[in-house]
């Protein structure tokens, strides 16, 4: 991808003053795999994000990815870009505001904690570190392999994570560092490399809900009485993520938590990992939402109605395989047969490049769509 991503011209061009997708744009977006379950809010948010970042969905610089949400019983769509999209947004921001930006050498860490500037081992690295330099300041980030690796239902790495784990992990660390250096420009959109793990089958486990890219910020604006209700957040002063989590864990005032969330969002700290009062490690954004929900609800009763599993009920979701397994398996078999018939020997790479998701984790609808393209039966 070139240093400057080109913008689509003509009928598909996105205007700065545009408030909704045109019929022509909507028709092309549907051809990229966006299903009928997408909501108006998701589409409107995607338009705003495209306008703010300057990335073009019609040139596949940014796209909406649908993932099955068991709680919503539908595919929930969130925006993604590639690491090249992040680099272009950063370069444009520097060109617009002035200053400079660059990188230190990427480092990889083995299981013993030793850092190296090149990864030659057969096994994947345990971590990668990238430092972005902006206007003389250093913004470092570390990505752990176990937190980002994309796996199949047997827990084995798949796709590019199986072929080039060091490169994939380096991209994740770079995205984290760039988001620290350019928090306002890159807020709301995550890279495909970072979000690959979101498609990992969870085997029916229960998790605290993660803050997803493109998700609305429910507490972005503090209530009018936040100051009067004892908000202890220091205005105009950056606080480390753990400090914010510590205040949220001790306060009994939901208004304080709302203000903490607003500040963490403004400082680009929502994705930082913090330790909660029960010693669990969570993303700051997910913890603040759970804590706010907890303070908004009545105190739990004792007896059978009380929950002792340590999970906030309002934020518990069940995750599982994307779509019905049998239907997806049949669609995948049809797609592989179609690819073999036309001599497409890099089907896995082409599918992941087009849809941003590996074949063995894709829903049946997308598998059949590519089959129709290969067989010439697409509408």
Image: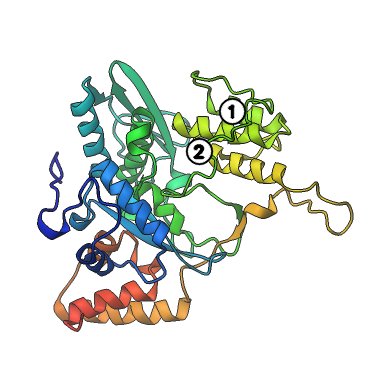
Q: Nearest to the eye among marks 1 and 2: give it.
A: 2
Q: Earlier in the sequence, mark 1 or mark 2?
A: 2
Front one among 364 and 5: 5
**Residue located at (27% from left, 59% from top):** 21
Q: On the rendered structure, is 76 left or right of 61?
A: right
**Residue located at (28% from left, 68% from top):** 30
**Residue that label 2 marks:** 220
Image location (x, y in percent) of residue 153: 48, 65
**Residue that label 1 marks:** 244
Q: On the rendered structure, is 309 left or right of 113?
A: right
Question: Circle 1 — which element?
Answer: helix
Q: What label sits on residue 30 in the rendered view? A: none
Q: State how far apart marks 1 and 2 are (Cα).
A: 15 Å
Residue 83 seen in this snapshot: no
Q: Is residue 291 above or below residue 369?
A: above
Residue 189 seen in this snapshot: yes
Q: Is residue 270 above or below residue 132?
A: below
- Label 2 crowd (10 A; few <14 / some 14-19 / many >=20): some
């Amino acid at each position: 991808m070139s240093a400057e991503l080109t913008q689509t011209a003509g009928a598909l061009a996105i205007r700065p003053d545009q408030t909704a997708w045109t019929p022509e744009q909507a028709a092309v977006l549907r051809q990229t795999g966006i299903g009928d379950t997408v909501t108006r809010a998701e589409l409107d948010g995607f338009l705003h994000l495209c306008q703010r970042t300057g990335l073009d969905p019609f040139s596949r610089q940014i796209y909406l990815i649908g993932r099955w949400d068991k709680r919503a019983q539908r595919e929930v769509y969130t925006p993604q870009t590639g690491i090249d999209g992040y680099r272009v947004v950063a370069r444009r921001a520097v060109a617009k505001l002035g200053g400079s930006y660059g990188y230190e050498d990427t480092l990889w860490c083995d299981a013993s904690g030793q850092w190296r500037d090149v990864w030659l081992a057969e096994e994947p690295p345990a971590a990668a570190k990238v430092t972005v330099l902006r206007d003389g300041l250093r913004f470092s980030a570390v990505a752990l392999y176990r937190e980002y690796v994309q796996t199949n239902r047997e827990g084995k790495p798949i796709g590019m994570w199986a072929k080039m784990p060091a490169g994939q992990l380096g991209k994740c660390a770079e995205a984290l560092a760039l988001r620290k250096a350019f928090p306002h420009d890159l807020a709301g959109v995550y890279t495909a490399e970072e979000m690959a793990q979101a498609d990992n089958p969870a085997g029916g486990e229960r998790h605290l809900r993660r803050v997803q890219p493109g998700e609305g910020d429910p507490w972005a604006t503090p209530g009018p009485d936040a100051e009067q209700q004892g908000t202890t957040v220091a205005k105009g002063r950056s606080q480390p993520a753990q400090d914010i989590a510590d205040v949220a864990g001790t306060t009994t005032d939901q208004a304080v938590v709302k203000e903490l969330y607003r500040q963490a969002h403004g400082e680009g700290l929502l994705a930082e990992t913090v330790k909660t009062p029960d010693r669990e490690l969570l993303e700051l954004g997910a913890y603040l939402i759970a804590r706010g929900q907890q303070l908004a609800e009545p105190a739990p009763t004792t007896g059978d109605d009380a929950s002792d599993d340590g999970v906030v009920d309002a934020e518990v979701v069940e995750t599982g395989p994307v779509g019905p397994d049998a239907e997806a398996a049949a669609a995948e078999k049809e797609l592989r047969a179609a690819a073999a018939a036309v001599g497409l020997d890099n089907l896995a790479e082409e599918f992941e490049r087009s849809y941003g998701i590996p074949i063995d984790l894709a829903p049946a609808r997308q598998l059949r769509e590519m089959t129709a393209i290969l067989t010439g039966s697409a509408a």
